[in-house]
Amino acid sequence: MRSKITVVGAGNVGATLAQRLAERNYADVVLVDIVEGLPQGKGLDMLEAGPIVGYDSLVTGANSYDETAGSDVVVVTSGVARKPGMSRDDLVMTNAKVISSVVREVSKQSPDCVLVMVTNPLDAMAQVAAAVSGFPRQRVIGMAGVLDTARFRTFIARELDASVLDVQAYVLGGHGDTMVPLTRLTTVAGVPVSELIPAARLEQIVQRARDGGAEIVNLLKTGSAYYAPSAAAAQMVDAILLDTRQVLPCSVRLDGEFGLTNIFTGVPCRLGAGGLVEVVEVQLTADETAALHRSAHAVEDVLQVIDSRRAEIDASLPPVGAGVLIG
């Protein structure tokens, strides 16, 4: 029996992800969006590419969640980008409402699924999804570190004219300004990157990785990145459905690891059947630990915005209140 994957959100990230997953040919894909005709049209287009590319994945577009029933993995990409005049807090609340609604529906239809969260602000939205779904921490995982690490590896490879496959690196912490690249453990064909790139230049590369999403937004003028984010989400789905046990930097709710409890942030995670297999606790320096803790505390600030305005969330949703999110 083929696996089943639901992708919520038929925008650029969601549609590109659905295409990548369909082309893998190991699962059927349901693409869900509230815009009538959009997921159906894109789904049909992908389905018709099957004979050319060579896959038999069934791709279905839908406006309701009925078609998603029994999904093994649900990837949530839906949400809004910040608009002119919209405050940061308003953006947080808007996406918290979207995620609460989406997660309520998909968890009802697929109570045993693994949730892979992509919507920003990522770590906080993963925390909301965990609270609304009631899923154990193994089955709510945020995509950020894979993308941030890919950007970091790309920039190092370009700096050295090396293959990206030879660059090994991890970026921990939150998605954005508070990310924590582990430059001390970064290697190129086994050689520490500190021996290949001067410290000042390496810091510039780290900063470019932190600004990676903003750089693309500024170039596009309208819209944001979707090729790399969709590839990152697909890699996580591969690890889960194919049970590869690959270690990837993902956002999960920590349970004492790295000295943090009941907060989502990016750490090395072994992914396999059922989602999170284990958090891999690499040995961090005092400075790296402090940076990781600062990143986690930034997530708490976002969650406090949600808690302070939780009455705005649809009353029919499960409560997302203090003691549930950041306890």
Image (cartoon, helix red, strand yellow):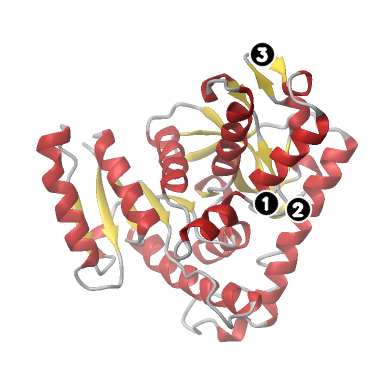
Residue 208 position in % (x across, y down): 66, 45
**Where residue 295 is drawn, which disc sits there?**
2
Task: Characterize the local packing of mark 3: few (<14), some (14-19) or many (20 or more) Cα atoms within 10 angstroms.
Answer: few
Residue 85, quarter of picture: bottom right
- Which circle's residue, 1 or 2, is located before the other in the chain? 1
Q: Residue at x 75, y 53 (%)?
A: 295
- Which circle's residue, 2 or 3, is located before the other in the chain? 3
**Amino acid type, label 3:** Gly
Q: Are marks 1 and 2 in contact (CB under 8 Å)?
A: yes
Residue 168 position in % (x across, y down): 62, 24
With respect to residue 78, does 92 lie above or below? below
**Amino acid type, label 2:** Ser
Residue 253 position in % (x across, y down): 64, 50
Task: Determine whether the residue tagged by mark 3 lies in a helix, strand or loop.
Answer: loop
Q: Quadrant of the C terminus?
A: bottom right
Task: Determine whether the residue tagged by mark 1 lies in a helix, strand or loop.
Answer: loop
Q: Please state if 318 lies on the left or on the right of 169 as rendered.
A: left
Residue 323 shows up from this direction: no
Q: Residue at x 89, y 37 (%)?
A: 286
**Amino acid type, label 1:** Gly
Q: Which residue is mark 3?
A: 190
Task: Characterize the local packing of mark 1: few (<14), some (14-19) or many (20 or more) Cα atoms within 10 angstroms.
Answer: many
Residue 222 shows up from this direction: yes
With respect to residue 249, does 190 lie above or below? above
For the image, the number of numbered tags is: 3
- Which circle's residue, 1 or 3, is located before the other in the chain? 1
Choose between 174 and 71: the one closer to the eye. Answer: 174
Q: Which residue is mark 1?
A: 174
